[in-house]
């Protein structure tokens, strides 16, 4: 503990809390003399926007969990796992059943929870999707419904088991029903159930689903849900009562079903509802333009806070809202520590993306509307950007593995084959042979005097050109490439010859030792494409053999097995500490 240091506590390890902690870590100075603490009931951060993928069994259960110790490795952030039950703002204390924590500055980011609007039986009989435990519970429940249906002889009861309703046509509900529509096809096959027996419903009380996005995108999402995924969409259909084996729509229609997944509304987390803070719509804590509550040293962020923009609109409960408010709260804590003026928060929301199953999405990015694969690509890129910020390359690797190679239900030919990956040690022999051939190619050029004489010829070469001269332009060479050869390469032939020799020998050594194999594979592919454009690529196998090397071939019996994890750790350490530590093995 630092002498006379100021303690900054961040309550909640959600998107906003993580952002606040990392911003403090990045921008603090030694002269600030602060200690940073983040406190949460769980030892991990949950990727809430991906919960539907676990609930519908698309990815591994742990695919939405990032442990706090991994996020804050190489930082000065202290992690406390505890459940705070009370806050004494006058004494500046966080109170749990087992301890009290004194703070000088507090950032509250405890998130939100489902709102049930007083609907009879909903909280007792509905399933929610707002936590890691919720996702696991839904997954187990769906499996149990198919298991019971497969054994049930009564057609009416069987039908009720196979009727699945997602209530709430916002982002979470739309993404949930989209994932579920894909998974039930696999479950039907496993349990020998006719797909026609399965009923999927997306129910919304408002006149349309996804009401905060453009109508053109809504139309595309609805069309995909109905035509591609066989989902019934009911709008203007408020749920008024939920029983264990049925639910009622608008006090009129009763639907027999054992599965109602509620995503119809959220409110600020009520675990600390009795504290002395002004609350507004959805029980969210009112904050000023600095994200500050009426206590000078207490800030609120994310879904927990009601932040009003200059045009008097509340920021929506989105991940980007949490990230932006978390960043500004952290900056203003530092401004208080430094006795500087507070910085007015100006959150910038860049867009909205909604996936409808794993193969389709709609998005509005800064006014640019897109759907299908482009929107899906943008969603993945946004996720990758966030994960890189909190966990570096390791989390990106985990994400890519879950989303593309670890998909559990395989609908479509690409995903059906992407998990059929061979162990990388089977590529060792091919890697060694490819390295040997590149090395010999470079050595042969040295022996053939490539370091002494011009051995390259362009389009102006005469018919007497010797057999040892490499002709870079042939009858199939594109005109633009021939121009590059004649104007850039041939006048600097000796330079390019040396570069080719260095590159070929470097590739040989890289493949043989298994060092930077992925980069070597990219260079190898580029070299072969270059040869293809010029000489016609006599040895096509070089190109074909380079492609499998992209799959981490150097991690088996190669230097990359040790080097890549070390460099990833080194990168994380540099980003967090702004300096390199040579002996970084843990």
Image (tube, helix red, strand yellow):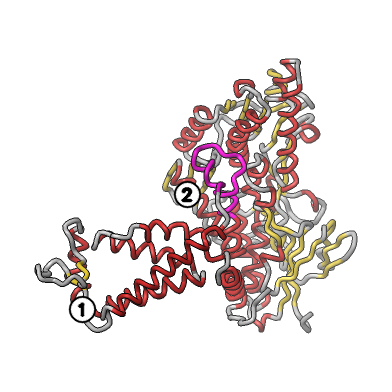
Q: Residue at x 33, y 57 (%)?
A: 540
Q: Residues within 10 Å of mark 2 (few under 14, many from 20)?
A: some
Residue 77, horizontal then vertical, whole percent: 71, 71
Residue 393, horizontal then vertical, whole percent: 57, 64
Q: Is residue 476 above or below residue 519?
A: above
Q: Quadrant of residue 96?
A: bottom right
Q: Residue at x 27, y 82 (%)?
A: 451
Is 11 covered by the magenta stretch? no
Residue 584 vs residue 416, the one in the foreground: 416
Residue 179, horizontal then vertical, whole percent: 60, 38
Q: Is residue 247 among what the camera can see?
A: no
Measure the C-alpha gap from mark 1 to mark 2: 47 Å
Left/right of residue 399 with respect to residue 61 in the rendered view: left
Q: Is residue 322 above or below residue 263?
A: below
Q: Magenta segment range?
A: 399-420
Residue 403 vs residue 284, the one in the foreground: 403
Is 406 covered by the magenta stretch? yes
- Name the residue that disc number 1 marks: 454
Residue 377: numbered disc: 2
- Asked whether disc 1 touches disc 2, contact meaning CB atoms under 8 Å apart, the reply is no
Q: Is residue 555 among what the camera can see?
A: yes
Residue 64, horizontal then vertical, whole percent: 66, 51
Left/right of residue 288 with respect to residue 414 in the rendered view: right
Mark whose residue sits in front, 1 or 2: 1
Q: Residues within 10 Å of mark 1 (few under 14, many from 20)?
A: some
Question: Closer to the N terminus: mark 1 or mark 2?
Answer: 2
Instruction: Tell me the element at label 2.
Output: helix
């Amino acid at each position: 503990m630092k002498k006379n240091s100021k303690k900054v506590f961040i309550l909640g390890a959600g998107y906003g809390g993580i952002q606040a902690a990392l911003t403090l870590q990045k921008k603090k100075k030694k002269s600030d003399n602060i200690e940073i603490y983040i406190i949460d009931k769980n030892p991990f951060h949950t990727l809430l926007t991906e919960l539907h993928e676990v609930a519908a069994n698309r990815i591994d259960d742990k695919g939405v969990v990032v442990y706090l110790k991994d996020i804050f490795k190489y930082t000065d952030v202290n992690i406390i796992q505890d459940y705070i039950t009370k806050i004494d703002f006058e004494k500046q204390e966080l109170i749990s059943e087992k301890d009290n924590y004194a703070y000088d500055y507090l950032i509250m980011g405890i998130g939100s929870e489902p709102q049930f609007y007083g609907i009879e039986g909903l909280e007792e009989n509905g399933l929610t999707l707002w936590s890691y435990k919720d996702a696991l519970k839904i997954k187990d429940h769906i499996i149990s419904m198919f298991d019971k249906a497969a054994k049930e002889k009564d057609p009416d009861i069987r039908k009720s088991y196979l009727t699945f309703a997602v209530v709430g046509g916002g982002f979470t509900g739309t993404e949930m029903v989209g994932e579920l529509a894909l998974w039930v096809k696999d479950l039907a096959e496993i349990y020998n159930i006719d797909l026609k027996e399965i009923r999927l419903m997306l129910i919304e009380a408002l006149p349309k689903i996804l009401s905060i996005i453009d109508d053109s995108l809504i139309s595309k999402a609805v069309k995909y849900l109905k035509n591609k995924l066989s989902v019934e969409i009911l709008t203007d259909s408020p749920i008024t009562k939920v029983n264990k084996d049925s639910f009622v729509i608008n006090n009129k229609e009763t639907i027999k079903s054992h599965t109602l997944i509620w995503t119809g509304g959220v409110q600020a987390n009520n675990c600390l509802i009795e504290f002395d803070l002004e609350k507004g719509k959805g029980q969210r804590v009112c904050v000023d333009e600095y994200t500050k509550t009426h206590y000078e040293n207490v800030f609120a962020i994310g879904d927990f806070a009601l932040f009003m923009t200059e045009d008097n609109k509340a920021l929506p409960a989105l991940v980007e809202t949490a990230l932006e408010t978390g960043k500004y709260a952290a900056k203003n804590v530092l401004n208080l520590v430094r006795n500087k003026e507070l910085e007015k928060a100006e959150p910038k929301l860049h867009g909205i993306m909604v996936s409808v199953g794993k193969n389709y999405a709609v998005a509005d990015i800064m006014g640019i509307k897109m759907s299908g694969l482009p929107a899906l690509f943008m969603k993945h890129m946004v996720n990758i950007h966030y994960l890189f910020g909190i966990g570096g390359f390791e989390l990106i690797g985990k994400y890519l593995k879950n989303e593309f190679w670890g998909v559990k239900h395989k609908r479509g030919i690409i995903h059906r084959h992407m998990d059929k990956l061979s162990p990388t040690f089977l590529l060792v022999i091919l890697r060694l042979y490819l390295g040997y051939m590149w090395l010999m190619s470079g050595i042969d050029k040295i022996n053939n005097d490539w370091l002494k004489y011009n051995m390259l010829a362009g389009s102006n070469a005469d018919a007497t050109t010797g057999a040892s001269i490499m002709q870079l332009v042939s009858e199939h060479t594109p005109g633009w490439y021939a121009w590059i050869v004649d104007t850039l390469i041939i006048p600097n032939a000796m330079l390019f010859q040396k570069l080719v020799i260095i590159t070929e020998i470097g590739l040989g050594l890289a493949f043989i030792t298994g060092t930077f194999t992925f980069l070597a594979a990219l260079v190898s592919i580029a070299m072969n494409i270059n040869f293809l454009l010029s000489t016609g690529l006599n040895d096509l196998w070089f190109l074909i053999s380079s492609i499998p090397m992209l799959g981490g071939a150097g991690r088996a019996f190669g230097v990359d097995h040790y080097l890549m994890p070390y460099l990833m750790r080194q990168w994380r350490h540099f980003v967090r500490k702004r300096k390199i530590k040579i002996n970084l093995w843990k």
